Amino acid sequence: MLGASETTAVGALRTNEPIEIDGAATLRQAATILHGEAVGALLIGNRDEVAILTERDVIRALAEGHDPDEARVEDFMTEDVEEVDISVEARDAAKLMLADEIRHLVVRGRRGVEGVVSIRDLLAAAVRFGE
């Protein structure tokens, strides 16, 4: 992934501040934010305890026949989220994501939750450092 002499902590790869949504929001509202912000995951909660709603969660709900105007984020969010410390190396984060078949990791630092790193962020870093 990253070159042998290149190491990057996941904290340096976060491209945006995490985008939050209330658990009572509808799936349509969540999908609108995901699309408008061009992100694959939204956080629900606070800097101490979070859940996550991903594109996959929205797709699963729709595939199961749930009405996006009635179904609530809190009914489809993942509460047992994978988290990594802000200092974890990108290579290790990528290994975890591959092993657990996930696309997003919550990044935790001194202030609590400091962001989300996505598989896209890791791929962009691999391309940047591979040149």
Image: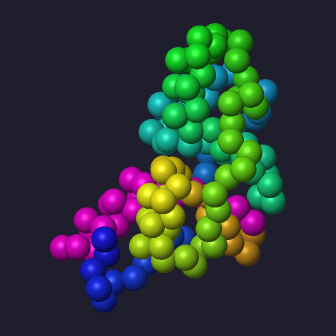
Does the magenta-highlighted stretch encompass residue 125?
yes
Q: Residue at x 56, y 43 (%)?
A: 41
Q: Residue 74 lies in what quarter of the image?
A: top right
Q: Is residue 95 above or below residue 18?
A: below
Q: Is residue 107 in view from this perspective?
A: yes
The quadrant in which the N terminus is found is bottom left
Query: Which residue is farthest bottom?
Result: 5
Q: Give residue 115's position: percent from left, percent from top.
A: 61, 59
Q: From which residue to which does the magenta span run?
A: 112-131
100 or 81: nearer the eye?
100
Q: Main secondary structure of the magenta part?
A: helix
Q: Give residue 73's position: percent from left, percent from top.
A: 70, 29
Q: Is residue 75 above or below residue 87?
A: above
Does the magenta-highlighted stretch encompass residue 81?
no
Q: Is residue 14 above or below residue 40?
A: below
Q: Residue at x 70, y 17 (%)?
A: 71
As drawn, is 72 to the left or to the right of 29?
right
The quadrant in which the C terminus is found is bottom left
Q: Give residue 90's position: percent from left, percent from top.
A: 45, 72
Query: Which residue is farthest left?
Result: 131
As drawn, is 19 to the left or to the right of 3?
right
Q: Give residue 36's position: percent from left, percent from top.
A: 48, 32
Q: Residue at x 52, y 34 (%)?
A: 56
Q: Is residue 114 in view from this perspective?
A: no
Q: Residue at x 39, y 53 (%)?
A: 120
